[in-house]
Image: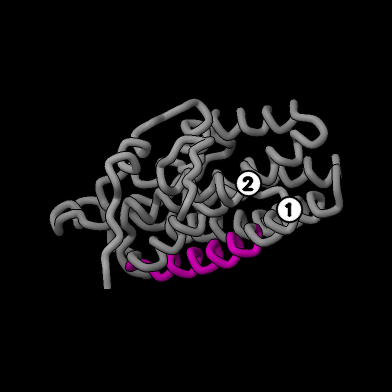
Amino acid sequence: MSAHRLTPSALSTGVVVVALTATIAALMFPVWSYADRSGTGPAELRAGSVATRWGPLSAADRDFLVRVRLAGLWRIPAGQQAVARAPSRAVAVAGEHLVSGHTYLDGRVRDVATRLGTEPLGVELPSQPAEEQRSWLRDLTAAQGRAYETSFAALLRRSQGQDLEVAAHIRHTTRNGLVRALADDVVTAALEHMKVLEATGLVDFDAIARDAAGEPPGVTHGGH
């Protein structure tokens, strides 16, 4: 079997950053801001964790709970807006799924945080979206017609994909039973939401693949 090698040109494109790429990269919310992440040493892992009756609660676990809460705080309004504007039935259906799915997850994460709140270093959840998330909602509100539909599908599909990656990582690494069960629910919801957003026919899979590869928008490869 032969290994695939990155060419120098492919490597160079990975470091090019343009405004659109920066905006999409912002969707990758900084979940791993704590020291306790995959690959950290045992001393750092212990320093970032606290014992609970459901297993150790790590800094990454706490960060994950905050992310789940923040996701609902901006995606529920985004879904409600899609239903109210109903530019197409497919977009309205996607909005309905976002509202119902994130309403459920919001209840779940608040319950988990409340239960863990009885433990040392419990989790304090935010009560409003981050400024960047509010700016995404403002951008969606300002968009009209086809521009609104494509922006809605692109923004929400990419963010759901990031949810899936993060939740799968937490599901794989957490030692806390409550967090593990919540990660299961997030994985399930993210997959469902991705599918209904893709059903709008507005998702640009080429753009998603380029983003994942670190390529700037507009880069194409022929003859492969």
Rendered location of residue 39, percent (x, y): 21, 57
Is label 2 in a helix, a strand or a loop?
helix
Front residue of this view, candidates 75 and 219: 219
Can residue 77 be seen in this snapshot? no
Residue 24 seen in the figure? yes
Residue 110 in the image: state x and y as whole percent.
55, 54
Q: Nearer the viewer, residue 110 or 72?
A: 72
The residue indicated by pointer 2 is 156
CA separation, marks 2 and 1?
13 Å
Of the image marks 2 and 1, the number of the one nearer the N terminus:
2
Do tag 2 and tag 1 residues touch (Cβ < 8 Å)? no
Query: Foreground residue, 47 or 193?
Result: 193
Instruction: Say which quarter of the image contains residue 105.
Output: bottom right
Q: Main secondary structure of the magenta part?
A: helix
Q: Nearer the viewer, residue 209 or 180?
A: 209
- Quarter where residue 186 is shown: bottom right
Other-residue count near label 2 (Cα within 10 Å), few / some / many at <14 / 14–19 / ≥20: many
Residue at screen point 58% across, 34% down: 133
Does residue 178 appear left or right of residue 36 in this picture?
right
What x and y, as percent, mark residue 147? 75, 34
Q: Quadrant for the N terminus, please.
A: bottom left
32 left or right of 21? left
Residue 123 lies, in percent from the top left, at 42, 50
Looking at the rendered structure, the kind of residue marked 1 is: Gly
Q: Residue at x 46, y 55 (%)?
A: 224
Looking at the rendering, the stretch of residues picked out in magenta corresponds to: 175-193
Task: Verify whether residue 91 appears in magenta.
Answer: no
Q: Is residue 59 above or below residue 26?
A: below
The residue labelled by disc 1 is 201
Q: Which of the two marks, 2 or 1, is nearer to us in this view?
A: 1
